[in-house]
Amino acid sequence: MDFNAWRRRRVSEPAYRWARRALPPMSATEREAIEAGDTWWEADLFSGNPDWRKLLDVPAATLTPEEQKFIDGPVAQLCAMLDEWDISWNRRDLPPEVWAFLKSQRFFGMIIPRRYGGLGFSPYAHSEVVRRISACSVTAGVTAMVPNSLGPGELLMQFGTPAQRDYWLPRLADGREIPCFGLTSPEAGSDAASMTDTGVVCRQVVDGRELIGIRLNWHKRYITLGPVATVLGLAFKLSDPDGILGEMRDIGISVALVPVDAPGVEIGRRHLPAMQAFQNGPNRGRDVFVPLDALIGGEERAGHGWQMLMSALAAGRGISLPSLSAAAAALGAHATGMYARVREQFGLPVGRFEGVQEKLANLAGNAYLVEAARRLTCAALNQGVKPAVVSGIMKYHATERMRQSVNDAMDVHAGRGVIDGPRNYLGSLYRAVPIAITVEGANILTRNLIIFGQGAIRAHPYLMPEMLALGNPDEERGMEVFHDVFWRHLRHAGMTTLRAIGRAWTGGMLAPTPTAGPTARHYRRLGRYAAGFALLADAALASLGGALKRRELISARLGDILSELYLLSAVLKRWEDEGRKHDDLPLVRWCMEQGAARIETAMDQVLSNLPGRVLAWGLRAAILPLRLAKGPDDALTRECAELLLKPSPTHDRLAAELQREPGPDPLGQLTRAFALAEAVQPLRDRLRQSGLRDWREAHRQGAITDAQAAQLEAAEASAAEVLQVDDFAPEELSPGAGRDNAQPSGD
């Protein structure tokens, strides 16, 4: 008997029948979400044998001269106009002159091509603009990011008809139209399929002419820019009960553009998200009629709304919130390092205490990692890739590290960070954390269902073709395709098993590295973990089948491993792209040690919870015979903390051009105090060694000159100014009191 025929009958056909029964049904929205966007570096990681040279050959994300000019010009001008305390406390909105500046300088048209009047910026430039603005004002950062992220502009560029692009894009670019996008409703948050917002195809007489259009009814909430929008992008379920467009009655989720002045639209009330002042609110529509050409992409795109949204989100989700997170991480690390140097207790800067140094090391490492991942993701987007899985990784992990960074910064600042007022440069970022965690796919959903759930299907080299074969209504053709893919999958699994065992039992020594030098061992280590992950993922998919969809904790941990592999790849890529800076190696090592500990913990937890215990024991022996990763040791923690406590090129790279010049603003005052503290430290050390701790007494005794005394006095006064917090008259904090005239004072 022909061997191929034998293995088909004895192996492939039983596997095919079992898999068809075990495969859970996939809804249309699930399938569209999974198929949206592209695969990229995560597919290499999922293969178990990533090609590191491919990663290092990706051109680094850079700004063009025109983009840099915009950063140095309009962006810097905008930042100088922003007073976050005034915006959040007094105005509850951006000042009119800021709105006018955003429109006149086309901040709302960063992603719109120049031929339509936009700036035509690269994804990296878009990200960099959002990052710079967010470091000055979360309100302004969110206001600038939303029209350039998930909204009408991106959808029109990807799916709009030529007529729609010609009309709407110039108006969006120059600010004549302010867009918002309505997706979330009270009934449907993460579960878009439960949306109750409807559109019914109908005929209606308008201005004496009968038009085919859509009668819309909706209730949306949490819509950023909604209260000030002039045009609403709306997601709804479209139906055609009278068969006006054809035989299909339930057409599905669709997307239309609705002018907010259309009869029946109710818009303008506001939410107040975590005391942030960016415009956000609910809106409704009652029997709102729009012509059929209001559908983005026209009639042929009817029913394809979810796929359109997921495709747009694959790009936008990799830019907006990661940019805000990178700003928070970098600013938190930079400011907290300076504060920990200036603030003294028990006669020492608080940054010299190991408990504080642990927080500083976290801040330094997370700032380096988030910025590295932002740049790598932007490099992919610059090449035209829309990496859906990577965008999910970035949304979840950038915002989670933002949460950790802001919390660590608050811990070190203590009361200085708790008391609100114009002097507090952390409060707005702290209040922004839950918003970043929640929007554009809540983090719980993203971690438990999306990263591995979508990643396994899209990035695995064989799973998607197998699923398509299993779902083919022509069983004979499906079996034929399945047989071919299934055996290639088995060969891949065999090679992965051998690779994973060899690399695990040699500590990664058999894994390839693209370079020699101090990072070579890190590439080998990641190569080992990638092989182990690929084997573990295949085993979980094979043993749990469709039940893995319901075993969210296992799926989440597998997603954690994939995510850490991506983030650590970005760290190594950043170190290469920045010219292999030796002084930055402690940060690279910290990221690697922290990430390796997280990977091994996640592997251990998956193995401890797989239902097939014999399989789990075998996998543990193969991929995790020993738990070797313990995280950064104390010496490395101290080394990374020191990088924030002194001026240096590494400190500057961590601050990522968010530093402030010495000046009257709170961060400017901190910058001045930090510089003065460093300048007088040799003199203070000399006085301490001579037994003179009080510089005034030393001055009286003639141990220091008048100039030296003046320098010490200036440093002391500057530090005292930095430590001040705000207070208010009781009537200024009373409900309804004249906030516009509130004049907080220092304590």
Image (spheres, rainbow, N blue to C red):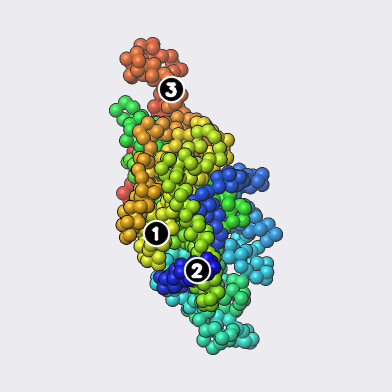
Q: Name the residue under label 1.
A: 540
Q: What element carries label 2?
A: helix
The mark lying in front, picked from 2 and 3, is: 2
Q: What residue type is labelled 3?
A: Val
Residue 309 lies, in percent from the top left, at 53, 66
Residue farthest toward the bottom in the current orientation of the protein: 242
46 or 639: nearer the viewer: 46
Label annotation for residue 361: none
Q: Which of marks 1 and 2 is in front?
A: 2
Q: Where is residue 116 in the image (x, y as percent from the top left)?
A: 68, 61
Q: Is residue 217 visible?
A: yes
Figure quadrant of residue 734: bottom left
Q: Helix, strand or loop at disc 1?
A: helix
| Residue topped by disc 2 | 6
Residue lying at 64% horizontally and 44% vertically, measured from the top left: 69
Query: Outermost residue toward the left?
Result: 346
* Dot 2 alpha-carbon crowd within 10 angstroms: few under 14, some 14 to 19, many 20 or more: few
Distance Cα–Cα, label 1 vs label 3: 60 Å
Cα distance in 3D space between marks 1 and 2: 27 Å
The residue indicated by pointer 3 is: 680
Q: Residue at 55%, 54% (x, y): give it.
A: 40
